[in-house]
Image (tube, grey):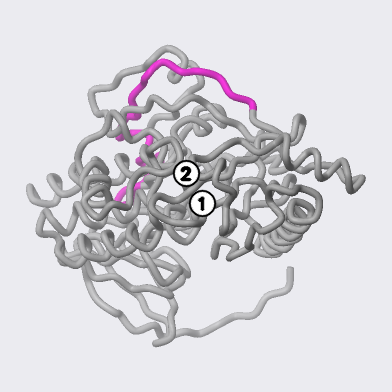
Amino acid sequence: MKHITENLTTPIYGEYDVIVVGAGPAGCSAAITLGRQGLKTLLIEKSNCLGGAWTTGFMNPLFDHQNKDGLLKELIDALKEKGQWGGFWNESFNYEYMKHILDKKACEAGVEVLFNTNFSRTLFDNKSVNGVVFENIGGRFAAKAKYVFDCTGDGSVAASAGCHFELGEDGDYTVCQGMTLMFIVGNIPEKYKDGLMIYEKLNAVYEKAGKEIPFKVPYLIPVPNSHFGVVQFTHMYEHDPLSAKEIGRATVEGRRQMIEAFELLTAYDEEFKELELVASSGVLGVRESRRIIGEYRMSTEDILSGAEFPDAVAKVTFGADLHTKSNKGQHCFKVLPYEIPFRALVPKGYEGIIVAGRCISGSREAMASYRVTGNCCQMGERAALIIADRLKKE
């Protein structure tokens, strides 16, 4: 590939105890916890709100929350207090209230948040990470820190520092789980307001139109105290999750599938003829990309045997759930409740960097279990407490 050489002078935006990159469930939880521990914390987010998959991604329900206390319980209690928890399987929430509650908690914790800010590269000396470079409307800046949390979901900060990672099977991204573009619909038929799997409905209209359905486990997921719901249906396979070009193609295909499904439902199904298409999510749902190689690698055996660890940062009960092209559905299997050790969040051989979320160290099958948002939230919080304790002792 051809290249250019740049001579850049990058101003230092500030110096912090910890910088968190990515404000999804893991990143928000880490930043809020660090701020509450009195640490000077910068949270960098590429979108205009906190919450990531929870908010920008229209992700419901909130899986694997039942066995967790701490910040996750705080969030759910706050949603309940506002009457914005319930809906599908009694574990769904209103996206705008989730944004608002996260804003409030981050502000109260003293976290400095930069929205609409893109991570550019990691600053490191040998294998010791000490900051990041980012860009936003104000320009290009560097920020220094004692620790950096990579909560990007894709392990982008760790990869920029040179941390090794796994992708798919032996680097073959074509086997990665299908990507999904969630979308909101309104004027839901009364009988579907508690939420249902709508495969029979969609498959029937696709057959009437002489078309092939792209996914066989679609759900209509109502949002509590509203007249709208979100649809999990579109599935795009064999796209490289580390290529902006491929992610763009998957997003365009997701919108095509969304429009096709909406038009077929309203044209061929009497119950859904008044359905309204409201909006697609602002971010593509990528289930699988980099898995950073850590000091410990979660194995498939760990999740099947109910592994426990003295340095546990999360307790997982959610079964493995792989969205596969082979059956245009989900390959699921049960797990025994197991723990994730802090070591799986520490990139092997590196200092000053923690990864939290689906990009931690583990097999594809293990990741397919712990990747859901309740677990990512707990990882971020518990890892933040460990790092806060270390920094206070220095």
Q: Report the residue marked by disc 1.
A: 154
Q: Report the residue marked by disc 2.
A: 359
For the residues marked 1 and 2, what is the alpha-carbon distance in whole angstroms? 6 Å
| Residue 339 is one of the magenta-drawn residues | yes
In contact (CB < 8 Å): disc 1 and disc 2: yes
As helix, strand or loop, the secondary structure at mark 1 comes to loop
Residue drawn 30% across the image and 80% down it: 12
* The N terminus - image quarter: bottom right
Residue drawn 28% across the image and 22% down it: 309
Residue 14 against residue 213 in the figure, above or below: below
Three-letter code, disc 2: Cys
Residue 254 against residue 340 in the figure, above or below: below
Question: Callout 1: 10 Å neighbours few (<14), some, many (20+)?
Answer: many
Three-letter code, disc 1: Asp
In the figure, is residue 61 to the left or right of 74? right
Q: Which residues are magenta?
A: 331-354
Residue drawn 14% across the image and 46% down it: 390
The picture places residue 42, in percent across and down from the top left corner, at 26, 67
Front residue (pair 376, 198):
198
Residue drawn 48% across the image and 50% down it: 59
The picture places residue 253, in percent across and down from the top left corner, at 75, 58
The reply to whether residue 349 is in sight is no
Residue lying furthest right: 210
In the figure, is residue 136 to the left or right of 6? left
Front residue (pair 126, 23):
23
Question: Callout 2: 10 Å neighbours few (<14), some, many (20+)?
Answer: many
The picture places residue 56, in percent across and down from the top left corner, at 47, 61
Residue 293: image tag: none
Which of the 4 image quadrants contains residue 204? top right
Which of the 4 image quadrants contains residue 116? bottom left
In the figure, is residue 108 to the left or right of 4? left
Residue lying furthest left: 393
